[in-house]
Image: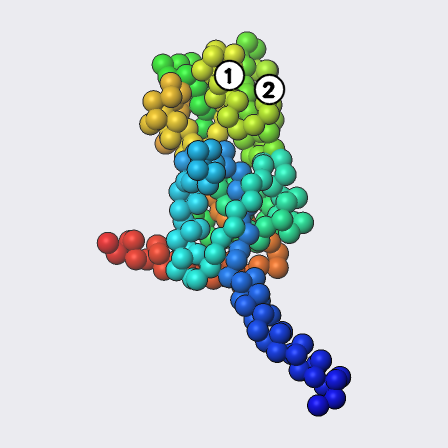
Amino acid sequence: MPLGRLSFSVAACLWLLFAPAALQADGEHIMVGTTGDYRPVTWLNTETGTFEGTDIDLIQRFARDNGLVLDFSRTSWPTLMDDLLTGKFALAVGGISRTADREAVALMSLPLEITGKVALVRCGEQESYSSLAAIDRAGVQVVENPGGTNERFARGHIRAAKLSILADNHEPFDWLKAGRADVMFTDSIEARYLEAQKTGLCAVNADQPFTRVEKVFLFHKDQAALRDRFNDWFTRQQAENSGN
């Protein structure tokens, strides 16, 4: 056999041996972005180095049922959309609210949960902050985490009270507990969780939130097939659960 044909045959055999496995691995692995700072839906367990939470459990169940392997990438609320749009991950999970701005540039799952913005305060002080008017007044300190819909809501409604935007999603809780701040706006799902965990922080009128918020998973624009696959799976899960 001529040397040229032999070289081609060896190369072809090597491709057949290794390329399909590589392509299969690429097809099975999905990169998922999450902030890991929003209990109970996503948080980073610093002892194990793994992400936990209800949204993490949900996407992992989807992956198991569909033969996918998930790789997680930590993001932040200020960088979430840029990280998604630049392809750092295929989808983002973890307490993400549907907004018009996000919907304009990314694909969204079906609503996973309906929640809304409420005031989070020190337990025992709920009556002092029972309305927006009671919150937005001189002498009240409102505190928020940066880059997400909590900050957007606060900036849209706070005029007379003082508003401080802190470094991350945990620092506002410390300010509330220490008496450095009076109110944080957050989703009722997080406020209820913190109250149930006996943190000393309580939700104000959690059953009557200021807004209606749909929580979703975000998908990169080129992940329509994955989004549809998740939506079909989620719909079946909902149907099965409602039948129990």
Image quarter hosting the N terminus: bottom right
Q: Residues within 10 Å of mark 2 (few under 14, many from 20)?
A: some
Q: Which residue is mark 2?
A: 164
Q: Which residue is mark 1?
A: 175
User: What amino acid type should be assigned to the residue bearing mark 2?
Assistant: Ser
- Residue, far left: 244
Rendered location of residue 146, percent (x, y): 60, 29
User: What amino acid type should be assigned to the residue bearing mark 1?
Assistant: Trp
Element assignment for label 1: helix
In the rendered view, tell whether residue 23 sits above or below residue 56: below
Element assignment for label 2: strand
Residue in view at x 32 percent, y 57 percent: 239
In the rendered view, tell whether residue 28 sits above or below residue 79: below
- Residue, far top: 139
Rendered location of residue 14, percent (x, y): 62, 74
Q: Are marks 1 and 2 in contact (CB under 8 Å)?
A: yes
Query: Toward which corner of the image does residue 190 lie, by quadrant?
Result: top left
Is 34 or 204 nearer to us in this picture?
A: 34
| Residue 220 visible in this rendered orientation of the protein | yes
Query: Toward which corner of the image does residue 163 lie, by quadrant?
Result: top right
Residue in view at x 46 percent, y 24 percent: 119
> What colour scheme does the image use?
rainbow
| Residue 132 visible in this rendered orientation of the protein | no
Mark 1 or 2, which is nearer the eye? Answer: 1
Rendered location of residue 113, percent (x, y): 41, 44
In the rendered view, tell whether residue 162 sits above or below residue 242: above
Residue in view at x 48 percent, y 11 percent: 179
Residue in view at x 60 percent, y 70 percent: 19
Q: Alpha-carbon distance for marks 1 and 2?
A: 10 Å
Drawn side of residue 83 relative to residue 184, left or right: right
Q: Residues within 10 Å of mark 1 (few under 14, many from 20)?
A: some
Task: Give the number of the disc on residue 44.
Answer: none
